[in-house]
Amino acid sequence: MTPSIAQPVLPADWRDLVALTKPRVMSLVVFTGLCGLLAAPVQLPPVLAFTAILCIALGAGAAGALNQWYEADLDAKMRRTANRPLPARRMDRQTALHFGVGLGAFSVVLMDLATNHLAALLLAISILFYVLIYTVWLKRRTAQNIVIGGAAGAFPPLIGWVAATGQVDLMPTLLFAIIFLWTPPHFWALSLFVRSDYANANVPMLPVVAGIQNTRLQILLYSITVAVAGIAPYALGLTGLVYGASAVVLNAVFLFLAVAVFANRAEEVSGMKPERRLFAFSILYLFALFSAVVIDHWVIA
Amino acid sequence: MNPHPEDEVLRRQRERARLMAWLLGAFVVLLFLITVAKIGLNK
């Protein structure tokens, strides 16, 4: 459990409540959820589609808030996170807990009301998975934290699709797989150049536990699986040429950058340009690939 | 540092109350629109 920190007297500023939801992470979650919804063969009325995406965003925000509530002690030890509302003592922990639980419950109930039970159930599972499986159970215990925990971030396109259709199909399962397999190389690239932060906070991220070169090898191996999953929707005939061509180009660049990371022998952060490039491109990769899913769907339609 | 912390407390409470009022209003409108859309789907 997180050790208690001196509690602030002032009530939390609403901007800090917003910061608690990790808005930058949320943007990727919202985008992939929207793509899942737009790529579905059934069109929801705009207000229900908007509500579904709103619920995905609120659910992700709730998970982020509960993550920060539980990890306030870790965040205080890492430069990257030390200025978050809880470690910076701009908010008391109980406010964060109440905010996270309330927002999570609200998002699930609203999703159920606006779309269907399965989408609401998947949303609830994704929040609980991120908080209980990743944050509480895995993150401080195993170097595989990101591998298994990555599933939490992979739910949004599946939820978006299910919100529209009411059922789980092969296409959203592949979208889930793409994000699931993309998460380790994405986070390991980041953790290579901020590994001292993780080491100081005693978080067993792969570079801290298994070493830098082993992490680079794992990044390359996972990038190959990302490429296989990324091209699978086209290979299986679920998408058209627009997606197929985009997937080939994007995965070729991803693999090229992963090979550059693997070939890098630098131990110092200053020599980790390939890692920074892969991390930056991996974000662009996901945006571009999911955009291609939607554009391809529209072209076929 | 604010020399009158109680003023800052009141300011933040007012700000949050105002925001909460807007959010509740938006929620009511959204619920209404969801209801209309759901009725439309079932026709």
Image (cartoon, rainbow, N blue to C red):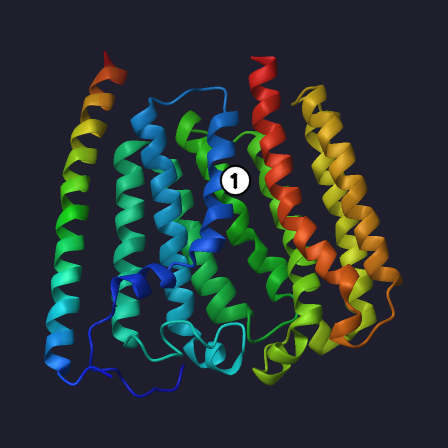
Image spot of residue A249 (x, y percent): 77, 35
Can you give x and y, in whole percent of width and height, for residue A193 in the image? 69, 70
Judged left or right of residue A222, residue A120 is left
Task: Give percent across and percent down for residue A93.
Answer: 30, 75
- Total marks in image: 1
Answer yes or no: is residue A116 visible.
no
Residue A193: tell me if it is visible: yes
Q: Residue at x 47, y 59 (%)?
A: A130
What residue does disc 1 label? A32
Local SS, label 1 = helix
Give amino acid for label 1: Thr
Q: Is residue A54 left or right of residue A203?
A: left
| Residue A129 in the image, given as x and y percentages of width and height | 46, 57
- Above or below residue A133? Residue A182 is above
Q: Nearer the viewer, residue A158 or A284?
A: A284
Specify the quadrant that holds the N terminus of chain B.
bottom left
Q: Mark 1: few, some, or many residues within 10 Å (few <14, many ≥20)? A: many
Q: Which quarter of the figure is the C terminus of chain B placed in?
A: top left
